[in-house]
Image: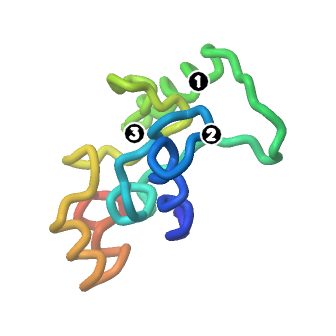
Amino acid sequence: MRPPARPRFLYGCGRDYDDGRGKVTNAQTSLYSWHGLGLAVEVVEKDATPWDAPISFWETIGETAERHGLVWGGRWRKPDLPHVQWRCATMTPTDADRMLYEKSGLAAVWAKHGAV
């Protein structure tokens, strides 16, 4: 799960500062992304060295995720190769998902989307 500071930093990319990536997310808080509700992950390298994995690596990750009923960001109009998420009814959490989280917690959101 992403701590609250991470989505604020990522939202600032291409808006408040430019590190060469341009805009990387439209999620202003962790609750506007499945990451913030524990239903999405990014496949990342453990240390801080630059990672230049070949496309075949990402395709293997994506195909494996899809075989298990997950969604891979590599199929999106703007590909997000490291992204894998639970197959939810909507691309991003809805107001109802955020309200459910605030009222009843993560387990309730997971149950709603069949993740438990």
Q: Distance of mark 3 from mark 1, alpha carbons?
A: 14 Å
Q: Earlier in the sequence, mark 2 or mark 1?
A: 2
Q: Amino acid at mark 3?
A: Leu
What residue would you read off at disc 3?
Answer: 70
Q: Amino acid at mark 2?
A: Asp
Residue sitting at 45 percent across and 52 percent down? 11
Q: Position of residue 36 (x, y in %)?
A: 43, 63
Q: Quadrant of residue 77?
A: top left
For this rendering, which residue is in front, 84 or 24? Answer: 24
Please report the residue visible at 48 percent of the width from the left and 41 percent of the height from the top.
Answer: 14
Ranked by sequence position, the earlier of labels 3 and 1 is 1
The amino acid at mark 1 is: Trp
Drawn side of residue 41 relative to residue 51, left or right: left
- The crowd level at tag 3 (other Cα within 10 Å; few <14, some 14-19, many 20+) is some
Task: Return the residue at label 1.
Answer: 58
Relative depth, front residue between 38 and 63? 38
Tell me residue 43's x, y (percent). 61, 41
Residue farthest to the left? 96
Nearer the camera: disc 2 or disc 3:
2
The residue beneath circle 2 is 19
